[in-house]
Image (tube, rainbow, N blue to C red):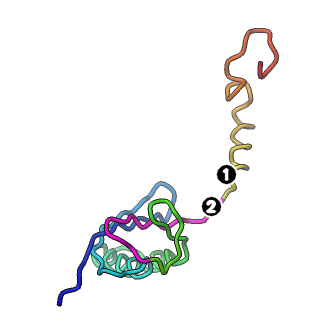
Amino acid sequence: MAESMFEVTLCWSLGPRHVQELKLRVPDGSTVQAALDLGIAQWLEFNPAADPVSLSSLKFQQPGIWGHKVPWTTIVQSDDRIELYRPLKVDPKVARRQRFKRQGKGRTGLFAKRKSGSAAGY
């Protein structure tokens, strides 16, 4: 008896603004880990110039399905989008504070539109 197969999408990024996406046909009952292993094998088959060492680093990233973090043992379903999240290098709150400091308070948020002669924020 043939095993039923369905399609999922595997997405990952090894660097900023370089997203890779791969459609996979996986057997029923596959886990996120099994889909990643199959995806790496297929990617290396179609792209012989790809670096297998950098692709093996994908196993250390946090997996998710449609934007929700999941464990590696989660069973995937038809049309799932499996995403691998890189760790953040900068805390988003710190980055926002630095951006605000660099842009100045005169052009952003509450301070953008003010009456002439009034204090900042009014």
Q: Which corner quadrant holds the C terminus? A: top right
Residue at x 33%, y 68% (from the top left corner):
8
Where, by quadrant of the figure, is residue 80 drawn?
bottom left
The question of residue 107 being in magenta is answered with no
Residue identifier under label 1: 92
Q: In the rendering, at what x and y percent does residue 100 appear?
A: 71, 37
Q: In the rendering, at what x and y percent does residue 97 appear?
A: 74, 43
Residue 32 disc label: none
- Secondary structure at numbered mark 2: loop
Residue at x 31%, y 80% (from the top left corner):
28
Residue at x 53%, y 76% (from the top left corner):
71
| 33 vs 64: above or below | below
How many other residues sit within 10 Å of disc 1, few (<14), some (14-19) or many (≥20)? few
For this view, does 109 lie left or right of residue 120? left
For this view, does 119 lie left or right of residue 48? right
Residue at x 35%, y 81% (from the top left corner):
29
| 63 vs 117: above or below | below
**In contact (CB < 8 Å): disc 1 and disc 2:** yes
- Secondary structure at numbered mark 1: helix
Q: Amino acid at mark 1?
A: Pro
| Residue most extreme to the left | 1
| 96 vs 40: above or below | above
Residue 88 disc label: 2
| Residue most extreme to the right | 119
Q: Which residues are magenta?
A: 75-89
Q: Amino acid at mark 2?
A: Leu
